[in-house]
Image: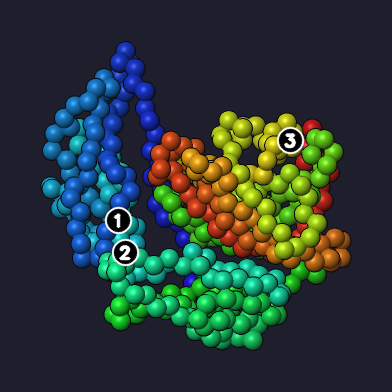
């Protein structure tokens, strides 16, 4: 079970060239994200090279490299890529005093990915474990099943993957199996954590995944906050924060609702918001937190050592639907000092550095148990 893992991040930006001032040459690979199966090959990436005058030019011979080689190998001269093992590999091409970077995802011919590998529940919560199947034989029939629970703290439906939280305690493993067309079986394992918070001073916990050009499997502190908006009515925030083991990377997910949360078994839509409406530089008393026009969310990843790898991604729907996802409060339980809540969320977010690129999409999915606290100073000045 993965407690915290970080996939390499590609930052792609459009550049405007000023021909009056020499700039470093730029080498752009395309596509910056591609995939293949173990044992298959990909042709060399397309590229665009711009010289120090900002003009399209020929960089000369390129030298190709990829790593880790346990995932993929490459011909240093031709750029042809070969899939070796499951994982994400970073591809580089160097030439003309510039380097271009891309990602390659390698899958097994039959692959199973857990979309929520750690599930956080309150007693009596239920949750159906989500997963994704990738296979080389698209027409083969899939069969999926789950092992019975190894602990009385949770029950697991072996056919559907429906988990029911019974009593609190440490992580209980779950195992899911997949076979397709009667061929080999693949399996993966995750965990279920059941929390029982006695009061609002008890720490909450969440676990979430982010899938896209940045990939995360992370858990940390969770808290629900009721606070007065500028018009005096109560709004709500769920704040989830994860700090890497070496304290260099801080990730945060925040959902903001226009209304307070006063009961369980309630689902709220999460709408789109653009960077101008929710710019990080405007996180103050007159922003989308304290005068929200609609429910929205964001995810950010901040590297304390390398600011280049800081990412902001805001909830983002499609061209035909502004709804980006939803958050469900599954339980609202009175405790000393107020209440605790549990739930889950799923929404699409668009990275600001790739805002007009489909590769900027991040899918954020998580579960949580959190104390619900009241703060009166969020929007006071």
Whole-percent x and y of residue 183?
29, 80
N-terminal label among 1 and 2:
1
Residue 38's image quarter?
bottom left
x 50%, y 41%: residue: 320
Whole-percent x and y of residue 169?
67, 78
Residue 13's image quarter?
top left
How has the structure been colored for display?
rainbow
Residue under circle 1? 35
In the rendered structure, are the residues bearing label 1 and label 2 in contact, judged by CB atoms less than 8 Å apart? Answer: yes
Label 1 and label 2: CA atoms lie apart by 8 Å
Label 3, secondary structure: give it: loop
Residue under circle 2? 107
Residue 86's image quarter?
bottom left
x 26%, y 35%: residue: 27
Label 1 and label 3: CA atoms lie apart by 42 Å
Residue under circle 3? 291
N-terminal label among 3 and 2:
2
Label 2, secondary structure: give it: strand
Residue 174 in the image: above or below residue 270:
below
Whole-percent x and y of residue 145?
46, 80
Label 1, secondary structure: give it: strand
Q: Is residue 270 left or right of residue 66?
A: right
x 57%, y 81%: residue: 156
344 or 266, which lies in front? 266
x 80%, y 70%: residue: 198
132 or 18, which lies in front? 132
Q: Is residue 292 left or right of residue 79?
A: right
Classify 10 Å Cα crowding around label 3: few (below 14), some (14-19), many (20 and above).
Answer: some
In this view, the residue farthest toward the front is: 320
Classify 10 Å Cα crowding around label 2: few (below 14), some (14-19), many (20 and above).
Answer: many
């Amino acid at each position: 079970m993965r407690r915290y893992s970080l996939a390499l991040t590609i930052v792609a930006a459009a550049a405007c060239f000023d021909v009056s001032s020499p700039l470093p040459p730029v080498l752009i690979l395309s596509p910056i994200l591609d995939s293949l199966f173990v044992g298959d090959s990909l042709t060399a990436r397309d590229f665009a090279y711009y010289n120090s005058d900002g003009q399209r030019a020929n960089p000369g011979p390129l030298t190709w490299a990829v790593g880790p080689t346990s995932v993929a190998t490459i011909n240093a001269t031709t750029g042809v890529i070969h899939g070796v093992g499951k994982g994400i590999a970073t591809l580089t091409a160097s030439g003309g005093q510039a380097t271009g970077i891309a990602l390659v995802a390698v899958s097994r011919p039959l692959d199973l990915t857990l979309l929520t590998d750690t599930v956080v529940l309150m007693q009596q919560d239920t949750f159906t474990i989500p997963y994704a199947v990738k296979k080389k034989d698209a027409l083969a029939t899939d069969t999926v099943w789950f092992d019975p629970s190894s602990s009385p703290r949770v029950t697991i439906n072996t056919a559907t993957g429906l988990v029911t939280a019974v009593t609190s305690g440490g992580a209980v493993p779950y195992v899911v199996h997949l076979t397709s067309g009667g061929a080999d079986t693949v399996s993966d394992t995750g965990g279920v954590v059941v929390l029982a918070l006695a009061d609002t001073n008890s720490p909450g916990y969440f676990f979430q995944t982010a899938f896209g050009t940045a990939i995360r499997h992370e858990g940390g502190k969770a808290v629900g906050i009721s606070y007065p908006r500028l018009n005096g009515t109560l709004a709500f925030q769920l704040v989830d924060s994860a700090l890497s083991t070496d304290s260099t990377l801080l990730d945060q997910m925040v959902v903001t609702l226009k209304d307070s949360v006063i009961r369980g078994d309630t689902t709220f839509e999460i709408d789109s918001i653009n960077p101008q409406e929710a710019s990080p530089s405007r996180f103050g008393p007159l922003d989308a937190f304290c005068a929200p026009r609609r429910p929205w969310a964001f995810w950010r990843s901040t590297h304390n050592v390398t600011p280049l790898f800081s990412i902001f991604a805001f909830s983002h729907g499609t061209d035909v639907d502004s709804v980006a996802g939803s958050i469900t409060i599954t339980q609202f339980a009175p405790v000393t000092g107020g209440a605790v809540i549990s739930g889950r969320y799923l929404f699409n977010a668009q990275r600001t550095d790739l805002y007009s690129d489909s590769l900027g999409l991040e899918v954020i999915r998580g579960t949580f148990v959190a104390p619900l606290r009241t703060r009166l100073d969020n929007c006071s000045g």
